[in-house]
Image (spheres, rainbow, N blue to C red):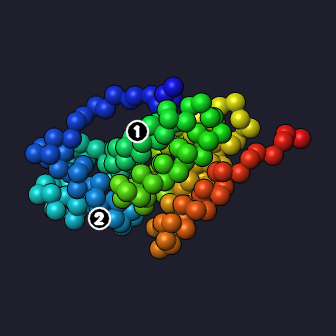
């Protein structure tokens, strides 16, 4: 049972196009420095385009960041969806398993800095939407707490903590049996 839904991308990153080169470089830049650490002029110069190209295609640095974040979230959610499919017969384990697989994927893809940051636009966040669908039929608000814990574990890695320690903390949180409702 797949709970992931496909969203059609309005572009395919062609590495030779200015737009594609800009997105590919931005993925690396935002992953290494976060939103505030990326300078638009330096980013565009590293790709050999003008800042006008960035503004033409994305409207702003925030618009480019939204494309990068969605692409990284998409990659992580694809892996989470695989875990949910494997654990579909065990709903409680599926919640914990997908959170851990998503954490591992974010680290492996070097997406942890971007995905630890709060989204700049809250209207479309794939990870939070995924947790929301995964937690249907469970206590209200669980998806919010789960997404916050997941992001906090990624932030631990950004802050220099050992990824194994951060994963262990997340695993402890998501593996606990829920308390009985009052």
Residue under pointer 2: 39
Quarter assignment of residue 9: top left
- Tell me residue 134's x, y (percent): 59, 35
Q: Secondary structure at mark 2?
A: loop
- Tell me residue 54's x, y (percent): 23, 49
Farthest residue, direction top: 1
Q: Is residue 119 left or right of residue 152?
A: left
Residue under pointer 1: 78
Count of marks placed on residues: 2
Q: Are marks 2 and 1 in contact (CB under 8 Å)?
A: no
Label 1 crowd (10 A; few <14 / some 14-19 / many >=20): some
The vertical placement of 175 against 155, above or below, is above
- Tell me residue 171's x, y (percent): 60, 56
* Residue at 12% from the left image edge and 43% from the top image edge: 17
Q: Is residue 33 left or right of residue 146?
A: left
Q: Is residue 87 left or right of residue 20?
A: right
- Tell me residue 108's x, y (percent): 37, 57
Q: Does the image show residue 18?
A: yes
* Residue at 37% from the left image edge and 47% from the top image edge: 72
Quarter assignment of residue 47: bottom left
Q: Does the image show residue 119?
A: no
The front one of 52 and 66 is 66
Q: Which mark is residue 25?
A: none
Farthest residue, direction right: 182
Q: CA distance from mark 2 to mark 1?
A: 30 Å
The front one of 176 and 36 is 176
* Residue at 34% from the left image edge and 28% from the top image edge: 8
Q: Is residue 146 left or right of residue 178?
A: left
* Residue at 29% from the left image edge and 54% from the top image edge: 27
Q: Secondary structure at mark 1?
A: helix
């Amino acid at each position: 049972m797949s709970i992931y839904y496909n969203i059609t991308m309005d572009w395919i990153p062609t590495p030779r196009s200015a737009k594609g080169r800009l997105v590919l470089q931005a993925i690396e830049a935002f992953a290494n420095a976060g939103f505030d650490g990326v300078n638009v002029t330096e980013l565009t110069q590293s790709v050999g385009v003008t800042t006008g190209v960035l503004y033409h295609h994305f409207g702003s640095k925030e618009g480019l960041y939204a494309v990068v974040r969605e692409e990284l979230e998409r990659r992580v959610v694809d892996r989470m969806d695989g875990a949910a499919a494997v654990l579909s017969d065990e709903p409680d384990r599926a919640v914990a398993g997908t959170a851990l697989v998503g954490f591992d994927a974010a680290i492996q893809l070097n997406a942890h800095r971007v995905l630890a940051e709060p989204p700049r636009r809250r209207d479309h966040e794939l990870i939070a939407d995924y947790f929301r669908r995964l937690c249907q039929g469970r206590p209200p608000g669980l998806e919010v707490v789960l997404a916050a814990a997941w992001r906090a574990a990624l932030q631990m890695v950004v802050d220099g903590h050992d990824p194994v320690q951060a994963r262990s903390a997340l695993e402890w949180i998501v593996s606990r049996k829920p308390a009985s409702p009052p």
